[in-house]
Image: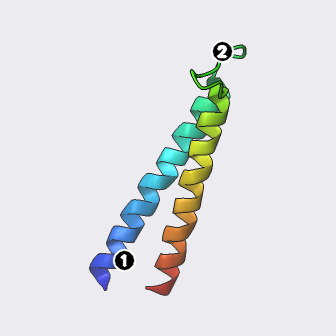
Amino acid sequence: MAGIDYDLHTVAGKLALCAQALREANQTLPSGLPPCDDGTELWCVYFGAEEAVREALATVRGAMAKV
């Protein structure tokens, strides 16, 4: 089980860094950017990605608690 625990910690660390990078990118986007081709505002893409990463991180942390 030690290998699984280490792998989960590694994944959790990488997901946390990814969420932080997405949060910082979202905060530094200039205002007034044109929307994506499908009409989606760019900040929504970054926010949605950050939310997905945070959910994945919560899942990994839940798995870590069971190991």
Q: Which mark is residue 33?
A: 2
At label 1, the amino acid type is Asp
| Furthest-right residue in this view | 32
Q: Which residue is mark 1?
A: 5
Foreground tag (2 vs 1): 2
At label 2, the amino acid type is Leu
| Furthest-front residue in this view | 38
Asked if residue 3 is positioned above or below residue 11 in the image, the reply reads below
Q: How is the image coloured?
A: rainbow
Q: Earlier in the sequence, mark 2 or mark 1?
A: 1
| Viewer-nearest residue: 60 or 52 | 52
Image location (x, y in percent) of residue 60: 48, 69
Image location (x, y in percent) of residue 22: 55, 38
Asked if residue 24 is positioned above or below residue 20 in the image, the reply reads above
Quadrant of the rendered image containing residue 26: top right
| Furthest-left residue in this view | 3
Q: SS at mark 2?
A: loop
Asked if residue 60 is positioned above or below residue 20 in the image, the reply reads below
Left or right of residue 4: residue 59: right
Image location (x, y in percent) of residue 13: 44, 57
Q: Residue at x 41, y 67 (%)?
A: 9
Asked if residue 57 is positioned above or below residue 1 in the image, the reply reads above
Contact between marks 2 and 1 (CB within 8 A): the answer is no
Give the class, few, some or many, for how many residues have Cα within 10 Å of label 2's Cα (few <14, many ≥20): few
Q: Residue at x 47, y 54 (%)?
A: 15
Measure the alpha-carbon separation of dots 2 and 1.
42 Å
Left or right of residue 41: residue 9: left
Q: Quadrant of the N terminus?
A: bottom left
Image location (x, y in percent) of residue 31: 72, 16
Q: Residue at x 40, y 61 (%)?
A: 11
Q: Quadrant of the C terminus?
A: bottom left
Q: SS at mark 1?
A: helix
